[in-house]
């Protein structure tokens, strides 16, 4: 876990609703996080990306290298750049 975001690499059923899954993960983890951090609150938004099974090992390495990776680029800037590159609309309020 990084101070301002968390990555999860999950294998889910094609019929799983991502919004419902994220809501349940946030709900289930909220008590744990609140007990460990003096100030904790999940943001309203999230980003979800699909990857092929062949790409999963590379994604796992990327997740494992977060500390070093985000010394070079902030998580917000990286996500913003990725969304722009992919042509995905986003709400700038989540980057404030």
Image: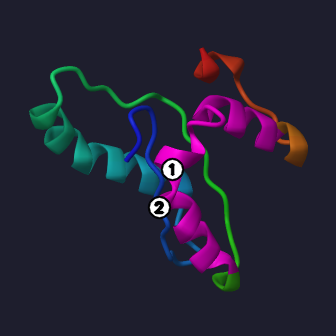
Task: Tell me where residue 83 sits by quadrant.
Answer: top right
Q: Is residue 41 above or below residue 21?
A: above
Q: Position of residue 23 (x, y in %)?
A: 40, 46
Quarter of the image with the C terminus in it: top right
In percent of width and height, residue 77 lies at: 70, 30
* Residue situated in front as seen by the camera: 58 or 17: 58
Is residue 90 or residue 1 the one in the foreground? 1
- Mark 1, Cα crowd under 10 Å, few <14 / some 14-19 / many 20+, is some
Classify residue 87 as left or right of residue 63: right
Q: Secondary structure at mark 2?
A: helix
Which residue is found at the position 64% from the left and 84% from the top?
A: 53
| Element under disc 1 | helix
Residue 26 appearing in the image: yes
- Mark 1–mark 2 Cα distance, whole angstroms, equals 6 Å
8 or 70, which lies in front? Answer: 70
Horizontal relation, residue 26 to residue 28: left or right: right
Residue where numbered disc 1 is placed: 66
Residue placed at 15% from the left, 40% from the top? 31
Residue under the point 63% across and 16% down: 93
Asked if residue 14 shows in the view, the reply is: no
- Residue 60 counted in the magenta span: yes
**How far across and how far down the image is residue 14, in percent?**
60, 76
Along the line of sight, which residue is nearer the eye, 36 or 66? Answer: 66
Q: Residue furthest left?
A: 35
Quarter occupied by residue 76 = top right
Q: Which residues are magenta?
A: 55-83
Q: Is residue 95 above or below residue 20?
A: above
Q: Which residue is mark 2?
A: 64
Residue at x 37% of width, y 47% of height: 1
């Amino acid at each position: 876990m990084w101070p301002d975001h968390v990555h999860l690499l999950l294998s889910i059923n094609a019929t799983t609703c991502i919004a419902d899954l994220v809501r349940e993960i946030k709900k289930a983890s909220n008590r744990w996080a609140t007990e460990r951090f003096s100030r904790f609150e999940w943001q309203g938004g999230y980003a979800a990306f699909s990857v092929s099974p062949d790409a999963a090992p590379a994604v796992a390495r990327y997740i494992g290298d977060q500390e070093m990776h985000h010394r070079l680029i902030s998580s917000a800037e990286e996500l913003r750049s990725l969304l722009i590159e992919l042509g995905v609309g986003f709400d700038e309020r989540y980057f404030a």
